Amino acid sequence: MAHATRAPKQWQLTKNKTITSFEAWRQNLQYILSLDANFASFLVNGFTWLKKTPTTRGLTDDGEPVPEAQRRTAAQKVMHLELMLGQIANFFPIVSRNTIVKNSTSVNSIWQSIRLHYGLQSTGSNFLDFDNIRLEPGERPEDLFKRLMSFIEDNLLKPEGNITHHGDLPEAEEEMSPSLENLVILTWLRLINKDLPALVKQRYGTELRSKTLASIKPEISQALDRLLDEIHTSQESKVLRTAFMKQAKVPFKQPIATPSKRICPLCKQAGRAKFDHFLSKCKYLPEGDRKFLTKARHIVSMDSDEEAPTDDDVDTSYIVEDDSDTSLLSPSSRRVSTIKSAQIKVFYQHHPVHLTIDSGTEVSMIKASFAEYIGAPISKTRQNALQADGVTPLDSIGEVHITLCRDKRVLHLDALVVNDLDVDVLAGMPFMKRNDVGIRPSKNQVTIGDSLVIQYLSDNSSSKVHHVRRAHAYILRSEPNQTVVWPGSFLELKIPNELHPESTLSMEPRVNRSTTSGWPKPGTIEAIGGKVRLLNDTTEPQLIRKNDQLCQLHTTGPIFYNADQHEDTSVPLVLNTMGQSRKTGNTGSPQYYSSAVSVDPDNILQDKDRQKLQNLLTTHDAVFDPGYNGGAGKFECHINMGPVLPPQRKGRLPQYSRDKLLALQQKCDELEALGVLKKTRRCEHYRRVS
């Protein structure tokens, strides 16, 4: 039994159609209609009929050449024609039904009217839309090639069309020539990547000597991913960034050939017992001569690239006085000025992020260890980066695409993840262009958009460090509305106006809070734009009441070590029997801090008086210790009680909160109802009878 031919199911046209989808719809419908013998004759190319006005629409009865079994009258043909037109109208319900059933004159006229409705009609200007074809996001390269081929095939000249070429209508349908096919493939490669045609010419140069570009198109399609990877690898971003490396200072070494001894010619000539010091250290040297020696020593050290020696290492007594004006000698600098790049702080979730803005960098980068610390998602990448020399590559392991925040402004960062980076995040030109970031180095300002101006600190700006600082605690309060901080979430709060908006603060919880969950925990926190973010790192939600005192903040500062006020740390400290600190030398014998004090340098006192004075210095040796109390300045503390005095305590009831007082009153009422408590006047006295 022979199986009947089954046609694919036809679908209706929608409002949005392309040339490819329309041609698929038309050919499927035409195939379904051709399966019916009554409709097949109307689908022949060149067959026409008239509009609905004539009764027979220009159709005639079949003659004798047609077999008798297949002969049809004009009325039958009109009936079959209108049935076919009705079927076409059923699958194209967007336009009026009469346009197809009553006003059509051929099948080609129906197709042209549909193309006219979608703007797909074949005209000379339609060919110019070829320039608007682009690779859409997420589109496969093969799909793009099909769109290009469909567009060219649809715009080929046809005899039934109304487009003329140099005034002549084509006698036959135009075929796609090999040169036109090569041009389509070249356009396809250029739309995928502008560097792809040059790479194809390099890789397939041998095949293209004897073949056309269209002949090797299947090979190009199979190797397309590999070719694109090669292009992405070769397009390396250069990081135009240089770092100033401070040259290690070489300590000054006295020439061995000319050793110097500490001998003061003035004291030696005067016959003093102590003359083992330089002339510049002599206390009998006039003040004017001392200043001249100091000035001459500084001028000599400026002209030398090495570190200037101290008075203890070099004898300056060889300098000869000159009557010439020394003010004519102007020191010259041999260093090039260096200024650090602008740096601002932003939030990534609850983590503070230090962004180094560098306009000379072509790609933004982030240190791999810092990206893992803040939990930024790292994805794979094919892109590499080079140092400023254009040769040394950076070790990139991936890329990140994160969203930052500062002052309710969202900043987008797309950066490469590298291992060797001297800063946490290096924001280059892509970051500056996308987020409208500008730098004004003369004012130490970074602008974001038209309204946000951030003041950053340069490396030349140094703040004065005071020996006496006031210890002050600032209370961090919650917002005036109640909220809940879930585990893993953070709470953003504004710090008091008295604190610097970009300061690093130490945080400790308040002991008078109603909740005892231990949150927030003590630690340090960074303020960004006058705001801080507290992370709920517990396993339970935290209920934050309105205006609740969460914690108290303290200002922090760097620790500066003054070498002039401290002795050599390589020498261990021990305690003497009198509780005074002293040093222990290499020989094991105690060395007192007071040993640097010169007792009777002119040998005027007697031996017993000199020994008494030396014993007095040894007894009070702790006074000469650089670390004695008060050596770093006074330490003062100011307790701010506030303008409001604490409320007076009532004598009758404890100072409980309102909730506790209500609970106490309710309990007293219950005891009074049970008869346990009664007023004094209602109490009945009973006498115990023994």
Image (cartoon, rainbow, N blue to C red):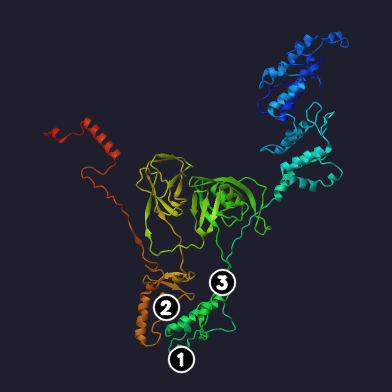
Residue 44 is situated, as x and y percent measured from the top left of the image, at 81, 20
Instruction: Check disc 2 and give the amino acid type.
Output: Ser
Considering every residue shown, the one lying at the far front of the view is: 167
Q: Which mark is residue 333?
A: 3
Q: Tell me which corner region of the image, top left, top right, bottom left or bottom right, holds residue 74.
A: top right
Disc 1 versus disc 2: distance between alpha carbons? 26 Å
The mark nearer the N terminus, 3 or 1, is 1
Q: Which mark is residue 224?
A: none
Q: Is residue 558 left or right of residue 300?
A: left
Q: Tell me which corner region of the image, top left, top right, bottom left or bottom right, holds residue 271.
A: bottom left
Q: Tell me which corner region of the image, top left, top right, bottom left or bottom right, holds residue 514.
A: top left
Q: Which mark is residue 269?
A: 1
Task: Judge by depth and name the residue closer to the eye, 242 or 164.
Answer: 164
Q: Is residue 187 left or right of residue 96?
A: right
Report helix, strand or loop for mark 2.
Answer: helix
Report helix, strand or loop for mark 1.
Answer: helix
Instruction: Check disc 1 and give the amino acid type.
Output: Gln
Task: Judge by depth and name the residue closer to the eye, 180 or 633.
Answer: 180
